[in-house]
Amino acid sequence: MSEKRPRNSSSRIRESLERIVGKNFVSDRLEERYYYSSDPSAEEPCAPDFVVMPGSVEEVQEIVRLANREKIPLTPRVGGMTLSGLAIPYGGGILLDLKRMDRIIEVNDDSMYAVVECGVTTGQLKTYLEENHPHLWFCQPHAPPSVGVISNAVIYGAGQISLGYGVSSDMINGLEVVLPTGEILRTGSCALGKSWLTKYCLPDFTGLFLGWFGATGIITKASVQLWPKPSIRDAMFYKVDTVEDTVNILLKLTKSEVCDDIYINSWTGTSTKRFYMSQKPEGTPEITMDIILSGKNQEQVDLKKRMVGEIMEEAMRKGVKVEEFEPPLMLKIAMLMVPQPLPFMDLMLGGGAEYLGCYVPTEEVGEAYKRGIEIAKKYGFQYLHVVRPFRTGHCTGIMYAFPFDKRNPEVVEKLLRVLVEICDMAISLGGVPWKPSPTVQKIVLKHADSQYVQLMKKIKTMLDPNGIMAPGQWAL
Ligand SMILES: Cc1cc2nc3c(=O)[nH]c(=O)nc-3n(C[C@H](O)[C@H](O)[C@H](O)COP(=O)(O)OP(=O)(O)OC[C@H]3O[C@@H](n4cnc5c(N)ncnc54)[C@H](O)[C@@H]3O)c2cc1C
């Protein structure tokens, strides 16, 4: 990054920001601006002019009013870990790091929800619940524990209960939002009074803010659903030779409603060494399937294990090559952890990691898997796929992971082409790209119905008349 002065810099703006949050929480120093300028994705870096850490909703409001008055871009961020450039401050301006707003305001044990501020991290909420409400948990991604609970809902993130209950955005009862013009809006039952119980029975305005990647306002609080935490969890592991057989098994497993979570991993993803191999070693199955089950007691877990076993035996009777195996104990323990430690992303020198997901029809997973391999190979990349069904199989996420050398512009250029082709392919199969990077968002908008895009434009203009919020995200 060059040494040049920030674009939107003026001592007047800096002093105004300092008056709002205090000197310690504003920076226009090169090192902070550099830190917040990029993420591991293939998206272009862009430095903010100021990094600001507000400590309260009132401070967020004042910053937003200042930015709106002065027409300065504003980008919210918590962990910055989406691996698809969603918190890069395009256009410079103010990067709002929300981590100081980290209060867990309320946990309702009976109606099972937590009201959290926007900087509460998944690690923080997990620890708080373990210490104070050990029988409850929330939809937690396998991302590092420094990522935000609310920011995960902004991107339709998936967790250990997503096969049963849906993704984290499904589990929001209500929001408090600072609009791009500085007013506060509440959605859900908290719009009626002090209850954060539900979003039922009212027009659902959470959709004005979830999936927008910060482009329509800053969520300052949310009510997040909690769920009963099972007493016992266990895992079963299978090797399957072909993706077609895997999908047939998957369709049966999801509808059986006995599994908490299912991971389908390509052979390349199961150990660091394998990712570097261009050919699959003889005798290696294409896929390993990790099945997580749980219960209130051992009897319930054993029954579920028997039911999974029966589905597998039925497949074997039909000639499918599927084999149960016991992984090393450490691996089994890791698979049962939430979050799971996932070492596969730090394989490459150069620090790049892209993780494009597509939510596709479960019956199309085989096609999405095979075409993902073809596209990766066409551009000289090794593939690494992880498949994870949601909501009893109503749709399934297929994640295409690409560790890459970010220092090499040719590699970056090729990878962007891979992502665009995967996005086109997934949409042609009836799917929707998950947490699309700005590059992939353009392809999504190209495919989208014109009335849909028009409505997006109207909403954006109505909420953000000066176009200050998260420029570059859903650039309509
Ligand atoms: C090893 C690894 C494993 C992962 N596994 C998973 C997984 O299992 N499941 C999963 O879902 N994800 C996973 N991820 C992806 C990602 O890390 C998570 O989805 C994470 O929750 C993103 O949160 P964040 O705090 O980093 O988001 P950020 O990048 O800070 O924000 C995400 C988006 O939301 C916007 N935003 C943030 N806060 C607000 C706010 N208050 N109001 C409005 N907009 C806001 C930002 O501007 C940005 O556009 C994984 C990532 C890694 C590196």
Image (cartoon, rainbow, N blue to C red):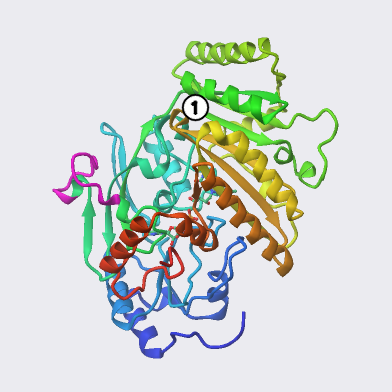
Residue type pointed to by label 1: Asp
- Counting labels gives 1
Name the element at disc 1. loop
Residue 135: quadrant of the picture:
top left
Residue 116: image location, x then y, percent: 33, 50
- Establish if 34 lies above or below 179: below
422 vs 16, nearest the viewer: 422
Which residue sits at x=44%, y=48%?
124
Q: x, y percentage for residue 408?
A: 74, 67
Q: Nearer the viewer, residue 257 or 128?
A: 257
**Quadrant, the C terminus:** bottom left
Within 8 Å: ligand 1 and the Cβ of disc 1?
Answer: no
> Dividing the picture into quarters, in which one does residue 456 lie?
bottom left
Q: Residue at x 36, y 89 (%)?
A: 12
Q: What stretch is highlighted in magenta?
A: 191-206
Which residue in the rendered view is the most extreme toward the bottom?
Answer: 11
Picture quarter with the N terminus: bottom right
Along the horizontal axis of the image, is 208 left or right of 425? Answer: left
Q: Disc 1 marks which residue?
A: 260
The picture places residue 199, in percent across and down from the top left corner, at 24, 42
- The overriding secondary structure of the stretch rendered in magenta is loop
Of residues 20 and 244, the one nearer the viewer is 244
Q: In this view, does 245 lie to the left or right of 81?
A: right
In the image, is 476 to the left or to the right of 437?
A: left
Give above or below for 295 relative to 30.
Answer: above
Q: Can residue 400 be seen in this view?
A: yes
Residue 272 lies in the magenta stretch: no
Picture coordinates of residue 126 (x, y %)? Answer: 44, 41
